[in-house]
Image (cartoon, rainbow, N blue to C red):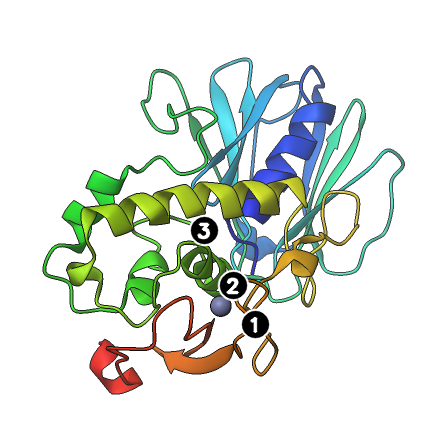
Amino acid sequence: MPELPEVETLCRQLEKVIPGSRVRSVTIQDAKLGEQRGMERKKVVRVRRLGKKIAVEFADRTRLLIHLRMTGRLFWTVKEEKIPHTRMTVSLDKGNLYLVDPRRFATVSADSCGGTAEGAGGTKIVGLSAEDLMTKARGKRRSVKTFLMDQRLVEGIGNIYACEILHHSRINPSKKAGDLTPGEWTKIVRSMNVILKKAIDCRGTTISDWRDLYGLPGAFQHNLRVYGREGLPCFRCGSTVVRTVLSGRGTFYCPSCQGGEGLSRDSSDA
Ligand SMILES: [Zn+2]
């Protein structure tokens, strides 16, 4: 599933090629997406990420919003191509943007972007402070890892990035979110920015099917410190990386540098 770094990668790549270009046509190949009328001749001024949505903004202060969900991908080609599982083709002066989505969960909508505060955070990767997180976590008995993966909190931190962020900040994934100290939240925010920025620089993580705008795999899988490394030595301390299950998700951590005490079982993680 594309997460924050993958969606940000697509936005940055699109931002380099489509602003200044005009829409020639929008062709919907899958009726489930709904119609997108009146896009012709609109001029693209900007592309940016809004949570996990890709917002293509036009000069008339309207925008096209694309949410990739589970298996959605965007591909850009200068020449027209036939790509299997294409659900929408946006033809522009400079080339063609394809929404490809084998499982058909991706959604597309259009609205006006005039004067809304949404996404005004600009270039910030994570628009939350340690204080924000601590306030939201107050009294929460869920594990910090499950908390970080709550899409209502920070859109786009999935299982892989949650594991890596917690290893980077040396915090045990099973620790109850409500029990973290201000210092621990500060570490988490710092680690979020480090890990997500690095993942964006690597154009995302390709463990199975993620590809960037040009069909190329990302490279952050080569930088994983705990995810998928059960039984292998921790890169930081040499102890063996362990896998446990939290809220039904495989969770990788180092019991030595992330502390082994206070581990909750899956059942107490609700
Ligand atoms: Zn370690």
Which residue is at the front of the view, 265 or 127?
Answer: 265
Q: CA distance from mark 1 to mark 3?
A: 30 Å
Q: Nearer the viewer, mark 2 or mark 1?
A: 1
What is the three-letter code of the residue carrying label 3? Gly
Which residue is at the front of the view, 8 or 72?
Answer: 8
Answer above or below: position of 155 versus 250: above
The label shown at residue 156 is: 3
Q: Earlier in the sequence, mark 1 or mark 3?
A: 3
Contact (CB < 8 A) between labels 1 and 3?
no
Quadrant in which the C terminus is drawn: bottom left
Q: Position of residue 4 (x, y in %)?
A: 50, 47
Q: Position of residue 141 (x, y in %)?
A: 16, 69
Q: Is residue 35 visible?
A: no
Contact (CB < 8 A) between labels 3 and 2?
no
Q: Check disc 1 and report its element: helix, strand or loop.
A: loop
Q: Residue at x 81, y 54 (%)?
A: 83
Q: Nearer the viewer, mark 3 or mark 2?
A: 2
Q: CA distance from mark 2 to mark 1?
A: 21 Å
Which residue is at the front of the view, 119 or 166?
Answer: 166
Q: Is residue 237 visible?
A: yes
What is the three-letter code of the residue carrying label 2? Ile
What is the three-letter code of the residue carrying label 1? Gly
Q: Residue at x 47, y 81 (%)?
A: 243
Outermost residue, right direction?
Answer: 79
Q: Residue beneath label 2, please?
A: 160
Label 1 beta carbon less than 8 Å to ligand 1: yes
Q: Check disc 3 and report its element: helix, strand or loop.
A: loop
Q: Residue beneath label 1, please?
A: 238
Q: Residue at x 37, y 23 (%)?
A: 120
Mark 3 Cα-neighbour bin, 10 Å: few <14, some 14–19, many ≥20: many
Answer above or below: position of 56 versus 216: above
